[in-house]
Amino acid sequence: MKEISSDVVEKLKKILNQVFEDDQKYRKVSRKLLDQYGQNSKEVQEIIEKTAMLDKKNLERIEIILEQYGWLSKDIIGFKESEAIFLVIQHASLDTQIKYFPIMEKAVELGNARKCDLAMLQDRILVKQGKKQIYGTQLIYNEELGHYVVEPLVYPEKVDERRATVGLPPMKEYLESYDLTWTNGEFKKK
């Protein structure tokens, strides 16, 4: 990675901080709206549209940064700002995720990105491809059941071992915020 002046670092921090805020802006309320009104409601559809517009804008910003500077580490720009790069790629199209996966993989090898984030991106790609996920990071809202469900997993009884290798908490802990329990490779609504 080429040397970046302190002025440029400050500008990048400002941009990436805004990208982070924009990325999370509507996602913070979408789960509540989903639970309250359902997937096909006007309220949820409006949030999905607003989120998609911000995601497109954010991806344009991130692609310029990645092209010019590569995957910037938290040591250079700060944790939240570095996390913004991951979040935008995580929320992008499958083609974009596939494009940047090897770049993020290299960033993890260099210590510029987190293993747990790479695991989440890998799961997201696999699920979008109709395959089973590895780390159990991907859930989907099941309208019929009225709650989230864990997307299919490869050897679910071993998922906590795999999660530990990338710094993710055990499934039981992860699923508590979704009001789900995890026992012996299976989940259910509390």
Image (cartoon, rainbow, N blue to C red):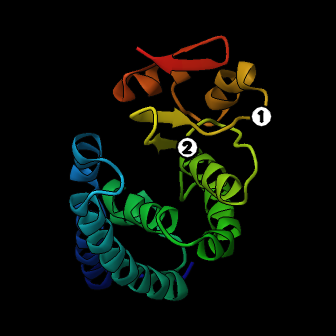
Helix or strand or loop: what does disc 2 sit on?
A: loop
**Residue 165 to residue 84: above or below:** above
**Residue 181 to residue 18: above or below:** above
CA–CA distance in space, label 1 to label 2: 13 Å
Q: Is residue 9 left or right of residue 89?
A: left
Q: Position of residue 135 (x, y in %)?
A: 65, 37
Three-letter amino acid code at disc 1? Answer: Val
At 66% from the left edge and 66% from the top edge, which residue is drawn?
101
Q: Position of residue 56 (x, y in %)?
A: 39, 81
Q: Is residue 137 visible?
A: yes
In the rendered image, the quadrant that contains the C terminus is top left
Count the marks: 2
Q: Is residue 84 left or right of residue 93?
A: left
Q: Which residue is mark 2?
A: 138
Three-letter amino acid code at disc 2? Answer: Gln
> In which quarter of the view is residue 35 placed?
top left
At 38% from the left edge and 29% from the top edge, which residue is drawn?
178
Q: Earlier in the sequence, mark 1 or mark 2?
A: 2
Q: Residue furthest top?
A: 183
**Residue 154 to residue 114: above or below:** above
Q: Which residue is mark 1?
A: 154
At 37% from the left edge and 22% from the top edge, which residue is drawn?
179
**Within 10 Å of the Cα at label 1, are there few (<14), some (14-19), or many (20+) other Cα atoms?**
few
At 73% from the left edge and 18% from the top edge, which residue is drawn?
157
Helix or strand or loop: what does disc 1 sit on?
A: loop
Q: Position of residue 2 (x, y in %)?
A: 53, 83
Depth check, front residue: 4 or 123: 123
Depth check, front residue: 65 or 61: 61
> In which quarter of the view is residue 143 placed?
top left
Q: Position of residue 167 (x, y in %)?
A: 56, 33
